[in-house]
Image: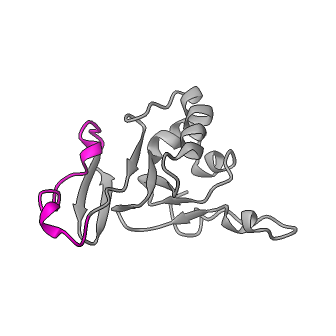
Amino acid sequence: MPLSKNNYKAPIPEGPKTRKDLCTNIIYREEKRVSVSFTTLVIRVNRLEEVFGSIEEFHELLDITMICNGELLWVKEMQSPASYLEQMVVEKLVPKGFQVNVDLAFVSEYMLDYMKMENNLELLGKPHPSLKEINWLKSVIEWEGQYVWLK
């Protein structure tokens, strides 16, 4: 079945509606560029589908909201270090053969000093410094945000 807005939203479970129930889903976005904020875990969708069969099968293992654009799936964590995401990778993905920086990548938002713009001009329009070794992602830092996308 082709990827669409309708088939990448997990249904809200029947029964009592808790905050956890309401937040656990897959959100489909059509944009190619993924916005990086806080700590963002980015995973190649083709690798997820190869191992799990579908995004939904992967989603059943986790209790988190995911965002997917058909090429990449991403999850954001406000904590740094993102211990929940790191634990998920170690416990759920590495045993299935996933490799960090090959199948998935962690990207931390680079905090720009908006008050001292001259100190950050060298970063604008350039790739994210932490992704230099990752050959399947492109990235850019802009004043409006920091973005990654599949090469």
In front: 14, or 38?
A: 38
In this picture, residue 70 sits left or right of residue 21: left
Q: Residue at x 75, y 64 (%)?
A: 21
- Magenta part, dominant SS: loop
Q: Is residue 103 above or below residue 26?
A: above
Q: Quadrant of residue 144?
A: bottom left
Q: Quadrant of residue 23?
A: bottom right
In this picture, residue 101 sits left or right of residue 68: left
Query: At which x and y percent is residue 131?
Result: 28, 43
Number of residue marks: 0
In front: 125, or 79?
A: 79
How are the colours assigned in the image? Answer: one colour
Q: Residue at x 63, y 52 (%)?
A: 56
116 is within the stretch colored magenta: yes
* The magenta segment: 113-136
Q: Residue at x 26, y 53 (%)?
A: 139
Q: Quadrant of the N terminus?
A: bottom right
Q: Residue furthest front?
A: 116
Query: At which x and y percent is residue 81?
Result: 49, 45
In this picture, residue 49 sits left or right of residue 135: right
In this picture, residue 23 sits left or right of residue 34: right
Query: At which x and y percent is residue 93?
Result: 56, 35
125 is within the stretch colored magenta: yes
Q: Is residue 89 above or below residue 16?
A: above
In front: 119, or 78?
A: 119
Q: Is residue 43 above or below residue 100?
A: below
Query: At which x and y percent is residue 120?
Result: 17, 61
